[in-house]
Image (cartoon, helix red, strand yellow):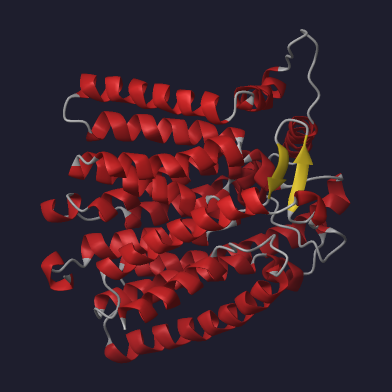
């Protein structure tokens, strides 16, 4: 029975965050997501109806989930129609991913009625972490990238073959087992956490992910060590260990990572300008955004809305190569304005409202969610993921809120 709940939640989770977006069978999952969005829309109507009938009202957090699920698609469609003349229907359909946040309502309802428990959520997150780790290692080690479609694998001068897979659960897996190491004081959990971080360093090789993961390692080590000095020393030793493993496994691996950062600073080993298509594209995207801001200052506050790729080729049709997610929070302001940021900040305020019990604070899974949410917020400054794929934040946020505010004795789950 419990395994069935874990499977159901895990499948919904994967579909909501578009985990298989670039996989060869992504079309089938997009169809599944479309069916799920229709079901979520019906569920929203049923949820509101039951609240009215029972006269129970909405919590502020519940209301904020419903509000952002409806506000952002409608608001974005309105702004895009005003700025570019895009028909509202295209704008709404282009922002349909916001409906996936309604999964948060499902989580709240299931947890309040004790149909889904903290232990079930923990098992699901851990299962998805191992599923991702084994799947991605298998892809990198066993597949021949030259035989695969370019929608799934790209070739970079710095990284070599790079698969378009989502390291979302890899990050959670590292945080979870790294916290278990501090909680249980058992070296096996440090070894397991290393398996996850090795994937980030040796296989993903993303600049932004590498930097944010480094920051998270520092924060967890310092704040979870009872002795801060020992924590810093432990951090140094872990970094040294990882470096040694790096040199043994891939003597030239350091050059790959170091070279990937050089385009940011415009340097190379021969003191010449390094040309990187990804960096140059981002500068072009920033120039386009700043030009539009100067031309229409009001867009800084209200945004321009999102363009659907199905209408005149979307932003690419307006500006050439252009993806707002490439420039992180600047892209968010471009689409939704500071008004959109303010709306999301209110949602975060309601999510973090209330106090957790001491017993909950000692829960490794609960602490893992705390640090994972921090990671997602920091990462979003570089990618805007909270806005451009909102389920990645709303789902763990709803689990976090449920555990924190509707607690019952953890022993009941054992």
Q: As displayed, is residue 208 above or below residue 82?
A: above
Occupied quadrant, residue 72: bottom right
Q: Please indicate whether residue 155 sits to the left or right of residue 351 in the image.
A: right
Q: Position of residue 340 (x, y in %)?
A: 55, 52
Query: Which quadrant holds the C terminus?
Result: bottom left
Q: Please indicate whether residue 352 sits to the left or right of residue 378 in the image.
A: left
**Is any atom of residue 70 visible in this view?**
no
Q: Position of residue 16 (x, y in %)?
A: 54, 68
**Front one among 198 and 376:** 198
**Is any atom of residue 20 visible in this view?**
yes
Q: As displayed, is residue 353 above or below residue 160?
A: below
**Front one among 236 and 54:** 236
Q: Please indicate whether residue 83 sits to the left or right of residue 360 in the image.
A: right
Q: Residue at x 12, y 54 (%)?
A: 359
Q: Position of residue 214 (x, y in %)?
A: 45, 31
Residue occupying the far top of the picture: 271
**How many labels, in total?**
0
Q: Residue at x 68, y 23 (%)?
A: 259
Q: Position of residue 168 (x, y in %)?
A: 51, 52
Query: Which quadrant holds the N terminus?
Result: bottom left
Q: Please indicate whether residue 294 sits to the left or right of residue 176 in the image.
A: right
Residue occupying the far bottom of the picture: 53
Occupied quadrant, residue 94: bottom right
Q: Residue at x 51, y 31 (%)?
A: 211
**Front one among 121 and 397:** 121
Q: As displayed, is residue 130 above or below residue 235?
A: below
């Amino acid at each position: 029975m419990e395994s069935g709940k874990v499977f159901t939640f895990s499948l919904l989770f994967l579909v909501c965050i578009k985990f298989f977006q670039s996989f060869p069978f992504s079309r089938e999952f997009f169809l599944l997501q479309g069916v799920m969005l229709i079901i979520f829309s019906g569920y929203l109507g049923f949820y509101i109806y039951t609240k009215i009938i029972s006269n129970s009202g909405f919590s502020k957090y519940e209301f904020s989930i419903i509000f952002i699920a409806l506000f952002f698609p409608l608001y974005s469609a309105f702004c895009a129609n005003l700025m570019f003349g895009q028909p509202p229907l295209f704008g709404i359909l282009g922002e349909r991913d916001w409906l996936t946040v309604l999964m948060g309502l499902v989580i709240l309802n299931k947890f309040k009625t004790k149909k889904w428990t903290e232990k079930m959520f923990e098992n699901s997150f851990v299962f998805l972490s191992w599923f991702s780790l084994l799947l991605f290692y298998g892809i990198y080690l066993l597949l021949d990238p030259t035989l695969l479609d370019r929608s799934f694998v790209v070739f970079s001068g710095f990284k070599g073959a790079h698969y378009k897979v989502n390291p979302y659960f890899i990050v959670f897996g590292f945080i979870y087992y790294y916290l278990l190491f501090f909680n249980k004081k058992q070296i096996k959990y440090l070894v397991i956490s290393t398996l996850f971080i090795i994937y980030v360093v040796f296989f993903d090789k993303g600049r932004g992910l590498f930097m944010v993961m480094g920051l998270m390692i520092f924060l967890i080590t310092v704040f979870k060590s009872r002795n801060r000095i020992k924590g810093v020393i432990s951090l140094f030793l872990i970094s040294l260990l990882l470096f040694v493993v790096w040199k043994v496994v891939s003597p030239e691996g350091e050059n790959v990572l170091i070279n990937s950062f050089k385009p940011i600073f415009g340097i190379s080993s021969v003191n010449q300008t390094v040309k990187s298509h990804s960096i140059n594209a981002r500068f072009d995207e920033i120039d386009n955004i700043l030009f539009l801001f100067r031309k229409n200052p009001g867009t800084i506050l209200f945004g321009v809305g999102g363009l659907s790729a199905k209408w005149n080729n979307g932003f690419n049709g307006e500006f050439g190569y252009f993806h707002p997610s490439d420039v992180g929070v600047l892209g968010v302001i471009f689409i939704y304005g500071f008004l959109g940021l303010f709306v999301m900040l209110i949602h975060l305020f309601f999510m973090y409202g209330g106090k957790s019990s001491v017993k909950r604070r000692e829960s490794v899974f609960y602490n893992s969610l705390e640090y994972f949410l921090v990671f997602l917020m920091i990462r979003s400054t570089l990618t805007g993921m909270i806005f451009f794929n909102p389920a990645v934040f709303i789902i763990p946020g709803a689990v976090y809120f449920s555990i924190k505010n509707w607690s019952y004795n953890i022993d009941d789950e054992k």
